[in-house]
Amino acid sequence: MIDRLCRLVSTRSVSRDEATICEMLMRELGHAGLRVHRHLNNLWCEIGDAPRPRLLMNSHIDTVPPAAGWTADPFSPRHEDGRIIGLGANDAKGCVTALVEAALRTHQRLAQGERLGGTLVLALTAEEENSGKGLSEILPLLGPIDACIVGEPTDLTPMTAQRGLLILRCVARGRTRHPANTPSDSPDNAIATAARDIAALHAFDWGPAHPLLGACHAHVTKIQGGVALNVVPDACEFFVDIRTTPNQPHAATIELLKERLRSEVHVHSLRLVPVDTPDDATIVRAVLRALPGSAPRGSPAMSDMVFLAGTPAVKIGPGHSPRSHTPDEFITESELAAGAAAYERIAWEYFAQAASKEARHVAGSALVG
């Protein structure tokens, strides 16, 4: 696994430039005897012995560009003191390495005669870092998916809820006047209107907090307005980044802000919706059984989990989220080994849990009959 991770790190795969790493992974999986499919720079394969249930295990092969501050070449992996250091080692090529290992071990176990009782779909996808043509592009091609594991560095803590992202473009309107007029004579200063709305957003009541994610919150991230130094402005535009929870559906939040703000409210982006998987979902029970002592948590960070609304999903993986996108990013050998073992246990436990649930359903139906 260390060799695989080092090969992945040394293969540049900044978002939209994943063709080479995609081909490399396709060769490795193909050499193991798996039939690998590709669409754009996304690849997937199936391992199993029954058509249903189908468990998707997914992580992303792209990285952000290297930030300033690296002490060595970020594309030349270093193996030092139990750490593998390099761009993407933690986010998320460590997860990719562990998922591939778990899939290959499962494939070998089936070849040796063990029965899985379903199909594991391994999908390694592109453009996660810019929400581009990755998992969302291939989901319709994968066939039915009953549950999903999303590989992200969570220190193997199961994240069953994730915030959404709603970006709004707000425009305050006014009327151009000469600033020699007093403010009371010029009440329609667009910048002043925007300022009042921005202040209102800081004190806004977003509604009930989510038990795992907390309260919804917003930040104004960009603002511009004004015509000239000697003109009262007639327009001021500002963007609002709102991190939503399942308690604040995007459509309802937009309508609420349209009612409360004086500025016009326009949708800039709403495709990244909040997601929440109930504790009694089979995949959650499987994760908790595979990792005794763990408990569901909420994730403030974005991931491809946003494209799985309506599908029971858990975000989990080796590595530590605060290391992501930082100079000298790393994952440890022990984290990598624990990640592969965890993914393998989760997969087998999921199919065992699903079979047990089906058996109970059949028995209950027989009793009713």
Image: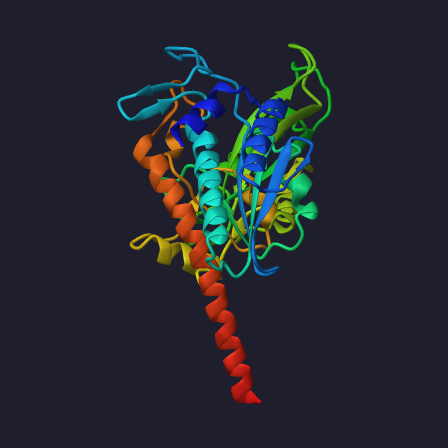
Q: Give 321 or 215, whichever is nearer the viewer.
A: 321
On the rendered image, what quadrant is the N terminus found in?
A: top left
Whether residue 95 is visible to the viewer of this picture, yes or no, is yes
In the displayed structure, does residue 203 sit left or right of residue 320?
Answer: right
Q: Where's residue 77, x and y in %?
A: 41, 18
On the rendered image, what quadrant is the C terminus found in?
A: bottom right
Identity of the residue furthest to the front in this view: 112
- Which quadrant of the structure image shows residue 80? top left
Position of 361 relative to 291 (above/below): below
Residue shown at 26% from the left, 22% from the top: 81
Q: Where's residue 318, x and y in %?
A: 38, 38
Residue shown at 69% from the left, 32% from the top: 40
Position of 306 relative to 177 (above/below): below
Residue shown at 63% from the left, 35% from the top: 42
In the displayed structure, does residue 169 sit left or right of residue 31?
Answer: right
Q: Where's residue 32, x and y in %?
A: 53, 38
Number of callouts: 0
Q: Where's residue 43, x and y in %?
A: 62, 37
